[in-house]
Amino acid sequence: MSSSAWSTQQLAEFLEVFGAVERSSLLRVAVDRVAESLDAEIAALVIGSEVAYSLGFPANEIPTELILKILDTQPATMEVSGLGFGYVMSTAVDADTDCHLVVIRSSSAYSREEATLLRSMGRALALAMANSELLGQLSERQELAERLFRIQQSISHRAPLQLVLDAVTQGAAELLNADIVGLHITQDQVDGYSMTSMTSMSGVTQQQRMLFAATPVRAGFSGRAFLENRIVVTNDYQSEPERIDRGGKFTSHGAMAAPVHRGDEPVGVISVAVTDTERRFTAAEQEVLLSFAQQVSLAVNDANIVHQLRSSLDSATYLSTHDPLTGLANRTSILQLLEKALVKASPESAVAVLFIDVDRFKNINDVLGHAVGDQVLIELADRLRSTVRATDVAARLGGDEFVVVARDISIKEAEELANRITEVMAQPATAGTREVSLSVSVGVSVATAVVSADDLLTDADLAMYRAKQHGRARVVHFDAEMRDEILHAAELEEDLLVALRDGDQLQVFYQPIMLLGSAQVDGFEALIRWNHPTRGLLGAEEFVPLIEKIGHIGQIDQFVLREATLQLSRWQALAPAHHTLSMAVNLSAWSFSDPDLVSIVEEVVRDSAIAPQNLHLEITETIMMDQTGRVALTLEGLRNTGIRLAVDDFGTGYSSLLYLKQFAVDALKIDREFVVGLGVDEQATAIVAAIVQLAKALGLSVVAEGIETQVQLDCLRGLGCAIGQGYLFARPVPADAAEKFLIQSAFSADR
Amino acid sequence: MNNNSVNDGSDGSDGSDELEQRTILVGSSTSTDSRLAGQEAAAAALGTDPLKLLVVYASPSHDLQQLQAGIASVVTGVPLIGCTTAGEIARTGPTESSVVVLGLSGNGFSIRTAKAAIQGEELRAAGSEVARCVEEVDRKAHTVLFLLSDGLSGDQQEIVRGAYQQVGVAIPLVGGCAGDDGHMQVTHQFFGDEVLTGHVVAAAISSDGPIGIAVRHGWKPVGVPMFITESSGVVVRSLDERPALDVYLDRLDAPQDARSDSVAFSAFAATRPIGVSRRGKEEVRFVARADFEARSIHCFAEVPQGGEAWIMTGDADSILSATDAACESALSALGEQTPKGVLVFDCIARKGVLGNDGITDEINRIGSHCGTAPVAGFYSYGEIARTEGVTGFHNQTLVVLAFG
């Protein structure tokens, strides 16, 4: 058993004893246990200027003056009558009551763990004393002891640190009846070894969790506990100058935070918040929080020791610090290095993080296989190594993510480095006999002052994400607004889950598709809209990617399919002239690879009693390019149901005639990107003309999207495009408005 | 508290010729006549110097009143403490149903004795109470508090804590718990001419000569540790959140009879202690009995909840190595002095592992370490030795107390 596991065990025993002991014997039991845990022959509890209880001196000759002098002068060693040479240690139990513990032993000096243990025991004693005064009830004390004991067990059992931390936050939330408990441990920047920054929260949404994880440990009200290295308490969080508005519906009123230590250094904070405006944290509750903080300190110390043990062998060290595939540094070691570098960060000596992600790497893996993918990664790693400066360090975080940490670098130099990397990485790679084209997106964040390694890495990650959003193969520098956007996305995600559950916020809108020659309605395109309670009406592009991410897209696709076909059926029934009306529905890539799609489509067609050819499913080129064969299989099944397929956004992607033929599509839709240029941009006009010609040659219908002006309409008519949609005719509108439009346009067309 | 002492000590001697002033003699008798046994053993423990203390270890098979009467017929008015045992030890070897009497004589010793009843949960108070005899003893160069307790009356660590709190770090504590030949029913203590039960008796022994004390066990932890998930005092209710008895039996793959029969269990458990962790070293806990209803196990010393525990194993070799180590350590504390007498407190469980041949071998080994010095001891239900550190109650150990 390691010495720190021993410490945690001792503390657990100590807490257990306190759980059951009566107040009258509390002090005596405490001193006994402290002495036995540290194997100290002499132990004393001093309250004010009185020795409340002592062990090791003859009962009739307790040297009060000597003990007080020890507290006063804090000697490390001393000669004690009867004992001889002794090692001395003391700790404050409770500053308010001027209560101290003193221990002296002959065997050896105290280790750091033992110093921590004494402090922890002092803390537990203060807790027990406060509890017996303030809580009074044995059952509550037992519950606390029990809880702390469980946590200690997971520490001793070497449960992953994250689980221990989660047990702490959950335990604190329950015992303190707190709405939110947060625990944030940052890297140690003191003596070389570091742990990855970790967080644990109880009572919060995913959104708040993310924001919390992104908040520096020194920031905010709880940051004060870290900076001042003491417990901080407020009954009015909203008036605190350092408060952080976390967004969402949660409003903290009472809050307290206590520092977590490694050795003597604060390395994190545990904080609690409550919404109850009447809530006041009692002294006993503060003690409880301090106890939990102490538990975390023990867990952190223990994890540190375990790590050091694991690193004791050279090969083990290499494996634990390097990525086995590429031989670059791994996440752990680059974070470690980054932390060290950040200690010295200043405007004169900035530290840059370049977050590099290979564009569309998934395609390489999917299309060419993982073996090729791995070869490409190895080659990219070699390129990265040879491109960075000698003092820079490159690492692979996992998957296709790479990081470069550059020290002593200016913002301009960092940008040059990033550009150089994008250039070098964009060279085609050879994998076996294949040549693979590549590009990378790079996010750059630069620290000119001491910040946490995790924060800087997260910033670079956000910037990289932005680079992807802006079309890939580029470099983007981090700016603070990006964080707000992440917050926005997180909030949206939470709201979306509510919307999916409640249902009535999601609506299908319909945009008429017109016969361009006669201005008659040919059909409608069904489009999902989200009527967000505070943000108003949101278009599909604003939330569908999010739905895809959180895995509910199939549900949405089915909802739209069902609503739209039923609606079409109703409209067709309004008048015989409407029997040929069609309905276009967009489905996600996920649905097209869902083997059940064919039967779902058959079912909605049957249920709505529409003719299958009046249902047009829109598919993107990207989906058709799928290599797995699943989409091809689905498309074939769909063809057999008699429904029609339209290629959305034709011309923007691969525009492969082979696919058009293979999948026997019925229609092409001309992307608005080209329609916008009609009559203005010769090239755009030429492309539209070519698509229309192509469609005619292949016997496909062609639909123009995004018609906004009369000029565009005239142009399309001139090019022979018969069908189109756009704001010129109508925006997507709810079903009742669409129906009005249908009736009116029929009426005007009739005339 | 009753103190019983003789006016010993300060006779103006300058201590320059210590050999004449401190004598230790041991007598033993295997007579089945209790009165005769007492007479024989006590007579052999008397020397020519003024007798300061008699220590009596007796088999519970004796009529203890008759035994006391036999001793009293040889010597009266001398402080006496003693107890029943689970086997007596003298240089002649280990015996059962015998009596061993040790006499400390000479003005180089100063003695005060005390007794205290162990009432209910007040073990600690009893420990403190008997320890007060240290305050009364005429202090010479070296002082030890010698304790004999009723090990069947609760957590003996509490007695040691109480004694330690009273006397402090300067006075070593040593002794053992009375036995009853392994029946675990009732033990007796002797104080003066009284035969008591449920008591702790003590002698503060102060000597001009050095005193050496050592404690060793010969057990090693095996297997992965278990968590003591529920215990109070000496009762262990659950290990790793399972009933403690089941875990104990399963881990040791106990035979059927030990799983249902309390006598068979005690015999089985006697050589299979559990270890608990204390500041980097394992302490051994003797498993005394099983509660088949509650599925708990009862140990002879506190097993702290929340700690870790191991199954311990030992064999003849490891136990005899511990014997050697304890003797060497205690005797080396005497420095240049040859031992005048040696007291041993040997756990009954060690006897269980060693067997009859083994314990004969052990006593011979002890004898060979001690040269010509007399040896007296007994097989105990728990041993006491606090010389450094703060814990002083042990299980499954050999404690050696040597007077120089």
Image: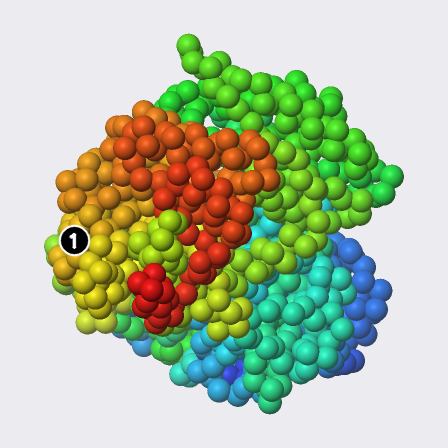
A484 or A337, nearer to the observer: A484
Query: On the image, which quarter does residue A278 sit in?
Result: bottom right
Going 56% across and 85% down the picture, which residue do you hit? Answer: A276
Q: Where is residue A201 in the image (x, y as percent from the top left)?
A: 52, 63
Residue A149 in sight from this viewpoint = no
Horizontal side of residue A264 vs A247, given as left or right = right
Query: On the image, which quarter does residue A117 sit in?
Result: bottom right
A435 or A541, nearer to the observer: A541
Horizontal side of residue A437 vs A237, given as left or right = left
A371 or A648, nearer to the observer: A648
Q: Where is residue A677 in the image (x, y as percent from the top left)?
A: 56, 40
Q: Please give the residue where the numbered disc 1 appears in the rendered image.
A: A611
Element on which disc 1 rests = loop
Horizontal side of residue A732 vs B253, given as left or right = right
Amino acid at the residue labelled 1: Ala
Going 46% across and 35% down the picture, which residue do you hit? Answer: A688
Q: Where is residue B177 in the image (x, y as percent from the top left)?
A: 40, 65
Q: Residues within 10 Å of mark 1 (few under 14, many from 20)?
A: some
